[in-house]
Image (spheres, coloured by chain):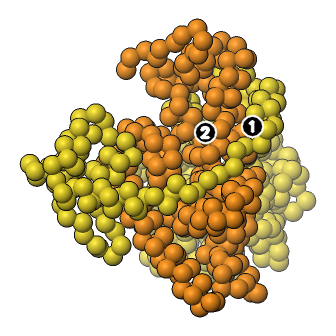
Amino acid sequence: MTAPRTNRERPSDEELLRRHVQGDRPAFEELVRRYTDELHRFLARFLGQRAWVEDAIQETFLQVHVSAATFDATRRVKPWLFTIAANKARDLLRTRTRRREVSLDQPAGPEASDDSGCVIEQLAVDESLVSEDLAEREESERVRRVVMSLPEHYREVLILGYFHQFPYRDIAEILSVPIGTVKSRLHAAVAHFATAYKRMTAASASSRNAAI
Amino acid sequence: MRRSDNGGYRTRMTDSPHNAKHDLIGYHLRLLDANEAADAAAAVQSSADAQTELADVQRDLAPLSQWTVAAPGDDLIDRILARTAHAPRLIPATKNTQPALARGESAPRSDGPMVSLRELAGLAAAIALFVGVFTPAYSNSRAHAQRVACLDNFRTLGAANAAYASAFGGVLPYAGATPAPWLNHVGPAGVQPVNTRHVFLTLRLGFAREPKLFVCPGRSGDRPMPDEAVSQRDDFSRPEHYSYSALLQEQAVHSERCSPVLPLMADCNPMFDPRCGNCGTGCRAAPVENSTSHGFGAGQNVLRADGAGVWATTARVGPDRDDIYRLADVLEYTGYERPTSNTDTFLVP
């Protein structure tokens, strides 16, 4: 791998991390500013809960802060950051959903109406994470529901591939799986998404027609 | 490859004119490396099927663009920086920690030793708890197994005694009156026990087949007499070849005329057990009533004249509840003391 390029105006991620290891606090702050938005978007789509997202992103940077000295200098920083973020997100999903001690597929409650969705859907709803425009919000919410219904390993590869457009080799590095596995997961994720989205759209249209 | 509908799962690979498969999802999302992308672009240019496939991919993925998320709060960066400002500093990389840390699986919480004092204390407490719980249990079960094995020795020796008595007119093993002193007796080979000659007869004559029957599993220092030495001796050659105490006999005991509960053998008499540290030229009453072979004073296995082996938690298991390890009204022993009555049983090494 070629050495990361640096310049005086915008040091590379790797340069910032190296300076942080040497005790340069502003370098770490620059790294945080550089990646907070992108990691926030990734975690928001992967987790769906604002409080969880902020916990995960803080844990991610805390991990970077503490273990920067262990970073393999032959790797690039950005995939490493996403690796840590994905691991933190998975940990959060497991621990917090386990603490609730309810099935995530069960109806949200005994009085839940048909359209109230299951528990995992309600867990994922956070008004502050969706757009304010009503039509856009409805569509965004529909897409979110479909993506959140995908298995975790499909969801993460779809988000990394579609929204962050990491090359296959970077996704493989982030998820620590072979490139072939990334490809097959992405293809399966797209197929599942397309099928589920069409089904949900058809259900919404039929319910609207019934209301008219 | 043409699009196939397989239960909702559709692969998004298409064939080029040269029949090579191309990943149109990767191509559309720009996930491919340069060579793969060039090949896929050529396939799309030259193949109507590939163009149709690509259009399907674009259509299927289009809804995802509608999924928007809000920007993080203005103070998130400040909170991240505040949280990390006082976090422990960097740790040196080691071969053991680097791979896991690089994957973000765990974060050490100290920049000093790899294990904090709290973790060390927790580990020590866990080990102490483990040892505290399992060591006594293991020790108890081991001691119990040894006690049972010892009792098996007595039951086998009881059968050997019965066989001997059957062969010798009902008389239990008897090698002549026990000489005095029976304690610290000095013979040709030096100081040696002499009350062991009676029970040795069962081994010498083959009624008891194995020397190990005379060794208690609960006494770690004792070991069986070598088989080849048995036929050459009239008594046990060394004290560690015999773990028990036996009835001090001045005359032969007839198996059918004695009490069936008369103790013939038992675990080592604590009065003359070197473990008690109370056996010199004269032995005073031991501080414990019971034998120390199976726990300190816990009890002893006893072989009775009727051949039964029993575990007794008291030494008063002789006729009329006599103490099998002590003579009546005698506190100090030199080796010349003898029972004063038929019910005053006395078992010595």
Is disc 2 on the same chain as disc 1?
Answer: no
| Left or right: where B8 falls relative to B144 | left
Tell me the tag on residue A38: 2
Helix, strand, or loop for circle 1?
helix
Q: Chain coloured yellow: which letter? A: B
Tell me the tag on residue B119: 1
Q: Report the label total.
A: 2
- Looking at the image, is mark 1 or mark 2 nearer the viewer? 2
Give me the residue at 57% from left, 87% from top: A209
Q: Chain coloured orange: which letter? A: A
Point out residue A60 in the picture as x, y percentages from the top left corner: 65, 38
Give me the residue at 87% from left, 63% from top: B328
| Left or right: where B327 falls relative to A73 | right
Q: What residue type is labelled 1?
A: Glu
Q: Which amino acid does label 2 sit on?
A: Glu
Point out residue A68 in the picture as x, y percentages from the top left corner: 61, 24
Q: In which quarter of the image is the N terminus of chain B?
A: bottom left
Q: In this view, does B163 lie above or below B148?
A: below
Q: Is residue B305 above or below residue A179?
A: below
* Mark 1 residue crowding within 10 angstroms, few (<14) / some (14–19) / many (20+): few
Q: In this view, does B177 lie above or below B17?
A: below
Point out residue A120 in the picture as x, y percentages from the top left corner: 65, 69
Point out residue B336 in the picture as x, y percentages from the top left corner: 76, 50
Give me the residue at 45% from left, 47% from top: A161
| Left or right: where A174 falls relative to B312 | left
The answer to which of B10 and B289 lies nearer the viewer is B10
* Mark 2 residue crowding within 10 angstroms, few (<14) / some (14–19) / many (20+): some
Helix, strand, or loop for circle 2?
helix
Q: Which chain carries label 1?
A: B
